[in-house]
Amino acid sequence: MVAQILLIAALQVTARARSLQPGELVVLTIAAPRATAVTVRAFDREVPPFAAGPDRWRALVGIDLETAPGTYPVNVTSDEGENAVYDLVVKPRQFRTRRLTVDPAFVTPPPSAEERITREAALLEAVWRASVPDRLWNAPFVRPVPQPANSAFGTRSIFNEVARNPHGGADFMSPAGTAIHAPNAGRIVVARGLYFSGNTVVIDHGLGLFSMLAHLSAFDVHEGDRVSAGQVVGRVGASGRVTGPHLHWAVRAGHARVDPLSLLALLGKR
């Protein structure tokens, strides 16, 4: 676990993370005794902070899985005009490669599927940009299924000997029909079948934090529903581009693809 502190004037910034590498979540804690509000900017994006006590805020900064090693400044400003620059020094991370054999239609989709794939990609991009500006999660994050994750986040995937996008989540080899629980409270923004991820549920936890639960066999929620932590949202299945039944859980934090196990390590049940 990495923990560093930067003190400039009256702003105190503390960063907590498993490690400062691609695919990791960083929890910033900002103490500003003279301020009533703060702003945070990291990786050229605004990161919405939330109240964490008197004169204290937190912000979730995601280091995307394809972030190059280097130093990335996090700019913190208070409404009292105080400024702090906190440097995140991202270290290299080596991801392994996996080779899988799947239905050829999920490697080289037929022309008849192209319009659907484009439409669904646009849908997800719109979802990532439209998170509610409030913190909807209200408890520690929980595992969606009891089984352990067996496929490393960030794995470089080769399907039918063709390289495709890195694996942007964690896979849990749960039996078909296993109940899937919401990792935390939020609003259901997607609950439908998608070409590659199959039956998919996306939960907006607020402030740019999302959970995607993919390859379901059945839904227990509808788009627009509000859910609580641990509520059943669907069942494990084998829909979409898969080699067998399992749950794929992906997390987005401010457009960054981060390891769900990083989220659990920092904000999960102790």
Image (spheres, rainbow, N blue to C red):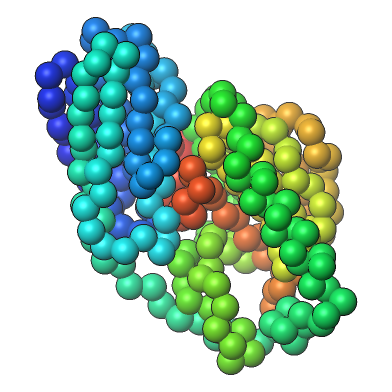
Q: Please state the total of marks drawn on the protein image.
A: 0
Residue 48 drawn above or below residue 79: below
Rendering quarter of residue 90: bottom left
Rendering quarter of residue 200: bottom right
Instruction: Locate residue 184, reporting x and y percent.
Output: 59, 35
Q: Residue furthest bottom?
A: 161
Q: Nearer the viewer, residue 83 or 21?
A: 83
Q: Residue at x 61, y 35 (%)?
A: 131
Residue 257 visible somewhere in the drawing? yes
Rendering quarter of residue 194: bottom right
Q: Residue at x 34, y 20 (%)?
A: 38
Residue 183 drawn above or below residue 136: below
**Placement of the C terminus among the 4 image quadrants:** top left
From the viewer's perspective, tell me whether residue 55 is left or right of residue 86: right
Instruction: Locate residue 84, reporting x and y percent.
Output: 20, 29
Instruction: Locate residue 75, reporting x and y percent.
Output: 27, 34
From the viewer's perspective, tell me whether residue 81 is left or right of residue 44: left
Q: Nearer the viewer, residue 238 or 13?
A: 13
Residue 21 drawn above or below residue 157: above
Residue 55 visible somewhere in the drawing? no
Residue 162 drawn above or below residue 183: below
